[in-house]
């Protein structure tokens, strides 16, 4: 996203952590994806002071930027640093460079709308989460930018979000990928603009357009506000020893079945 709406990442991250206030979770290893400018790390460090935080950062963020963010967030991050990866590596391979069953919490802020296959993202989260781990996420839903759809501006070519999933689609996908007790929520945020150029910058940042007007006069018909549909969700990784259900039946590995013995009679 563009710099003018960088505040949006921070605001949504704060709201996500507020929603987790009622969740009891002793997180030792956390995966933060994406870690926008390293700022979200400080929020998590305050909430989970003893956790090791693994970051998937933006491509333009340097190692020095991340080091500064670590210093600002908490001294412990320097002694027990988590792993750091660039988002480009995940987008290319579809894999987190982490072992199976290695993290307690995944926090994903405004990423899923930019993924062609959110289901694959959920599968990868399931892989790296420990038994009893939690995934918490936010993303922009399909009503985002709905004011733009009726527009007929010659040089403005609009597009839908790469993943136009509403919260019901995501809830179904969580269940389909074996997550337990999914909780979904949604809210509308409205941003008002004094200048069309500011709106145009955010349209580009939100990836809502293939091409944009170059002439100021062409922007005169733009609306003065933009609606964001923000979807929130979290779900638990429970019963990871169970095989994936087939035909609504879950199969258990025979090694997971305990054998109860009866004491010898006198």
Image (cartoon, rainbow, N blue to C red):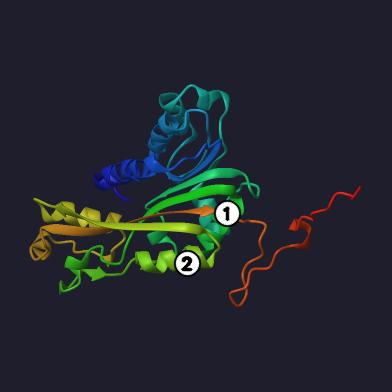
The quarter of the picture where residue 65 lies is: top left
Seen as rendered, the residue at the extreme top is: 75
Element type where label 1 sits in the image: loop
Residue in front for this viewpoint, 19 or 109: 19
**Pointer 1 or 2: first along the chain:** 2
The quarter of the picture where residue 3 lies is: top left
Seen as rendered, the residue at the extreme front is: 266
Seen as rendered, the residue at the extreme right is: 266
Judge whether 106 appears above or below 188 on screen: above
Left or right side of 206 for 155: left
Q: Which of the two marks, 1 or 2, is nearer to us in this view?
A: 1
Q: Which residue is at a point 44% across and 31% down the rendered structure image?
A: 45
Q: Is residue 204 visible?
A: yes
> Label 1: how many residues lie within 10 Å, few (<14), some (14-19) or many (20+)?
some
Residue 217: % across, % down: 8, 62
Q: Are marks 1 and 2 in contact (CB under 8 Å)?
A: no
Q: Which residue is at a point 53% across and 63% down the rendered structure image?
A: 120
Q: Which mark is residue 238?
A: 1
Residue in front for this viewpoint, 39 or 208: 39
> Label 2: how many residues lie within 10 Å, few (<14), some (14-19) or many (20+)?
some
| Residue that numbered label 2 is attached to | 173
Q: Is residue 117 visible?
A: no
Residue in front for this viewpoint, 194 or 228: 228
Residue 26: % across, % down: 52, 36
Residue 58: % across, % down: 44, 45
Element type where label 2 sits in the image: helix
Judge whether 74 appears above or below 178 on screen: above
Residue 24: % across, % down: 46, 40
């Amino acid at each position: 996203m563009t710099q003018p709406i960088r505040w949006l990442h921070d605001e949504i991250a704060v709201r996500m952590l507020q929603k987790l206030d009622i969740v009891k979770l002793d997180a030792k290893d956390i995966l933060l994806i994406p870690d926008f400018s390293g700022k979200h790390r400080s929020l998590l460090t305050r909430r989970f002071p003893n956790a090791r935080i693994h970051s998937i950062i933006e491509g333009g963020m340097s190692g020095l930027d991340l080091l500064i963010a670590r210093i600002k967030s908490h001294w412990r991050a320097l002694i027990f640093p988590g792993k750091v990866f660039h988002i480009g590596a995940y987008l290319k391979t579809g894999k987190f460079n982490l072992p199976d069953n290695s993290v307690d919490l995944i926090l994903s802020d405004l990423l899923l709308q930019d993924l062609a296959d959110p289901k694959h993202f959920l599968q990868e989260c399931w892989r790296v989460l420990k038994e009893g781990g939690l995934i918490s996420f936010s993303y922009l839903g399909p009503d985002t930018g709905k004011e733009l759809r009726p527009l007929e501006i010659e040089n403005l070519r609009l597009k839908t979000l790469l993943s136009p999933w509403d919260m019901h689609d995501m809830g179904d996908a969580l269940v389909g990928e074996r997550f337990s007790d999914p909780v979904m929520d949604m809210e509308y945020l409205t941003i008002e603009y004094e200048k069309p150029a500011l709106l145009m910058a955010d349209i580009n940042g939100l990836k809502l357009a293939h091409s944009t007007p170059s002439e100021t006069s062409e922007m005169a018909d733009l609306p003065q506000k933009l609606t964001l549909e923000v979807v929130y969700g979290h779900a638990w990784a429970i019963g990871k020893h169970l095989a994936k259900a087939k035909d609504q039946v879950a199969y258990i590995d025979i090694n997971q079945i305990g054998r109860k013995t009866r004491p010898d009679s006198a």
